[in-house]
Amino acid sequence: MLSIKNLKKEYGTHVILDIPQLQFESGLFWLKGNNGSGKSTLLKIISGIIPFDGEVNIDAVDLRKHPTDYRRLVNYVEAEPLYPPFLTGQDLVSFFISTRMANKEEVDELVQKFNIHSFIKNPIGTYSSGMVKKLSLVLAFIGRPKYILLDEPLVTIDKESVPILYELVKLYFGRGVNFVFTSHQAFELEGIVVKEMEVKDHKVWEL
Amino acid sequence: MGAVVRVLHKVLVKKFYERNVGLLFFVFYLMFGVVESNQLINYHRSLIYGVLTSPVFLMGVMGVWILYSAKYLQLVLSELAEPHNQFLKDYSRLGKSHQFWPMLLSVVMMDQPVLLYSVFIVGVGIFSQQYVAVFLVFVFHFARLVGCTWIVLRRINSLHERKATKLLTSIQWPWKKYFPFFYLGHFTNQLPLALLFTKSFSLFAIIGFMQITTDHYENRTALMGLLFGLMAHSVIIFESRRLEETYLIFVRGLPISMIKRFLFLSLFYGVLLIPELVLLAINHIVWFDLLFITLFAVFYLVYQHTRLFRGSLAIDAHTTFTFGLFLISFMLVLFKLYWLEAFVLGILGFYQYERDYYNFEASA
């Protein structure tokens, strides 16, 4: 279970999030909210890439006390990911395999599924935004995470890739992986209940 | 015309000096700070006389001036490629002479350090009747400034083609890149000129100081040169941190322990310093000293890198700190305490890295 306690995030005097208590049990969670409501900030906090006040833990593994173990349990992909343009997709995939101690064959399958094998050995600087997004989605599934956080996963990918993403979400959900995602488009996953939540007035509300 | 000059000044000239204040301050110190004040005028008069009377020396100085021009051209061309500067496309709508003069003025403003010193050169040249050399200096500066202006204007007039212009060919490694070398790849691919400048300066500083001869084994002369070289790496350190905050944000989310991250960082700076260390090794620095010098050099750079996780990522504060650390280190090297500084910087570097790494946020 992903648990958040007394979370506060401010930029200067501007409060972005003020969440006394929040829990994501097992399942798929769709975070909704207006632009600037704090959805992406919340995902960044949970992924451990930006500082915050409060507590975040997964199954009693605290983000502050056990930063490395915690990060093994969460994978995150940004809405508009940025990677060094001189690296190839293969460089990044190899780096993620080694840090997340992932199975290479499984990752090769992901690469095949998202159909990025044709350009993965080219420098990222030559990719279109859609190609970068597909690469970032492959990276999101590498390893053995308990939670995968996807910020606007449907933005910029082509319509052929959408069912592939749905299929992978179902597959990984079946293996016990939970998902928290933001999206301005509906997530159509047959046979799986998607729990909807809204980020509003600095807090997260169940819908 | 005045409005155009003001815009160019803000977008290009100001940015150039903001980015290079540390380097310029450092060169200024080398030129005027290391000589006794009562010897300063005689020293520079002799230096300039040497430049004017030796064609080889003059060509060498002209080479340095070309490198300086390349430095600001690199910045200007990369700034013109930035999305927020695309409004400069409108500059190409001006007539040829309306384009030329404001840009020439901007180039002259960026060239001020060279031009100011050239005034002294011309003065000494006229005084010592070296008219041919003075004439050559005039022609050279004229051609260089007009050439630079032409290159920038050519770039502005082709902005609509959206082609990136690089002054130095970037190096794309043909082999697989591993994490600590992401940083190195950034410099060989994105900032090759900055890397070339830093390494050239660093190596020349060591070679220069090693010309001082002593009648017994003395590693401090080499260390002084190395210290100047390390100071020149301040731009590399700052750009490495900028890389982390732009393209390597995702690395924060990966399960890598702080010790491992610190070792990766040390490995990157260790590899970066290989040319300096090889130069010291072939100049008969004993292996035991070389071991401590290596630790000193690596932790000197790592410490500055980890310090940039505090406060905002600002070049002016970084430059001031770099200079302060240089002065302290200079004294410690004089007293042969560099081994102690190596350990202190290593320990403090790791302490502040562990404390500040996850607390830093560029947009905060």
Image (cartoon, coloured by chain):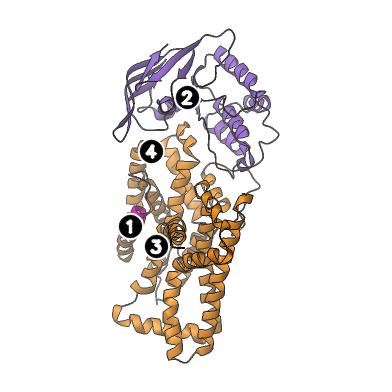
Chain colours: A purple, B orange
Residue depth check, mark 4 versus mark 2: number of the one nearer the observer: 4
Residue position marked by numbered label 3 in the rendering: B227
Q: Nearer the viewer, residue A160 or B9?
A: B9
Mark 1 residue element: helix
x and y percent of residue A94 in the render?
59, 35
- To which chain does the residue with label 1 belong? B
Q: Are marks 4 and 2 on the same chain?
A: no
Q: Marks 4 and 2, Cα distance to the nearest angstrom?
A: 20 Å
Residue depth check, mark 4 versus mark 3: number of the one nearer the observer: 4
Q: Are marks 3 and 2 on the same chain?
A: no
Q: Marks 4 and 3, Cα distance to the nearest angstrom?
A: 31 Å
Count the labels in the image.
4
What kind of residue is marked 1?
Thr
- To which chain does the residue with label 4 belong? B
Residue position marked by numbered label 1 in the rendering: B320
Q: Earlier in the sequence, mark 1 or mark 3?
A: 3
Would residue B210 be seen by someone viewing this image from the given angle?
no
Residue A40 is drawn in which quadrant? top left
Marks 2 and 3: in contact by CB < 8 Å? no
Q: Give, as a single range, the part of the protein colored magenta.
A: B316-326
Mark 2 residue element: strand
